[in-house]
Image (tube, rainbow, N blue to C red):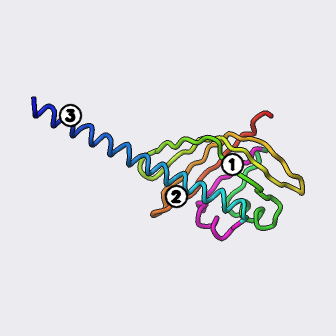
Amino acid sequence: MFRAYLLLNLCVSLSARALLGQDSAAARVLAAEDRRFAAMVRADTAALRVMLADDLTYTHTTGDKQDRTALLRSLASGELRYKSIAPTERTVRFVGADAAVVGGRSSMQVESVGRLHRFSIRYLAVYQRAGAAWQLVAWESTRLPE
């Protein structure tokens, strides 16, 4: 009986550690996403060069698709300005140890071609681990009805 109790206690302890590890890994992905959102609002292309994968695919709510170079160029020129990005819900799902998918919703304020647009989106972001950091590999967002 005592052995069964010890075995059960060990299993519960290992399961709890695995869940805590996953929670902290998810927190690191969301922290990387928060830093990326902040850099986009600041139009900090130097920081974004590190945060965005070389082979990034970024699909806007309009359906327009940009690679990393085009996205950085549009932010640097001011053609596209993120005034605010405010996530309202997010979930992280891991695909192996080095890839994570974030599904979320966000309230957005974006200035494009001199016009300010306020809207909400649902998005899917794919991150890959690059050393100790997480880089955005793909982004796709859908504008939600008002």
* Residue at 66% from the left image edge and 71% from the top image edge: 46
- The amino acid type, in three-letter code, at marker 3 is Leu
Residue 8 - label: 3
Q: Nearer the viewer, residue 17 or 138?
A: 17
Task: Write down the quadrant of residue 91 in the picture.
Answer: top right
* Whether residue 21 is situated above or below residue 133 in the rendered picture: above
In the rendered structure, which disc, 3 or 2, sits on the residue that comes first in sequence? 3
Q: CA distance from mark 2 to mark 1?
A: 20 Å
Q: Quadrant of the C terminus?
A: top right
Q: Earlier in the sequence, mark 1 or mark 3?
A: 3
Q: Quadrant of the N terminus?
A: top left
The front one of 52 and 1 is 1
Residue 97 on the magenta segment: no
| Mark 2 vs 1: CB contact within 8 A | no
Q: Which mark is residue 86?
A: 1
- Measure how far apart labels 3 and 2 are at the Cα level: 36 Å
Q: Position of residue 83 (x, y in %)?
A: 77, 56
- Disc 3 vs disc 2: which is toward the camera? 3
Range drawn in magenta: 44-61
Q: Residue at x 55, y 51 (%)?
A: 30
Q: Amino acid at mark 2?
A: Trp
Q: Residue furthest top?
A: 1
Q: Nearer the viewer, mark 2 or mark 1?
A: 1
Would you name the residue on which mark 2 appears? 134
Question: Which x, y percent locates residue 67?
Answer: 69, 57
Q: Secondary structure at mark 1?
A: strand
Q: Position of residue 129 (x, y in %)?
A: 48, 57
Direction from residue 32 to residue 66 in the image, left or right:
right
Secondary structure beneath dot 3 equals: helix
Q: Residue at x 59, y 54 (%)?
A: 33
Q: Residues within 10 Å of mark 2 (few under 14, many from 20)?
A: many
Q: Which amino acid, by three-letter code, is at mark 1?
A: Ala
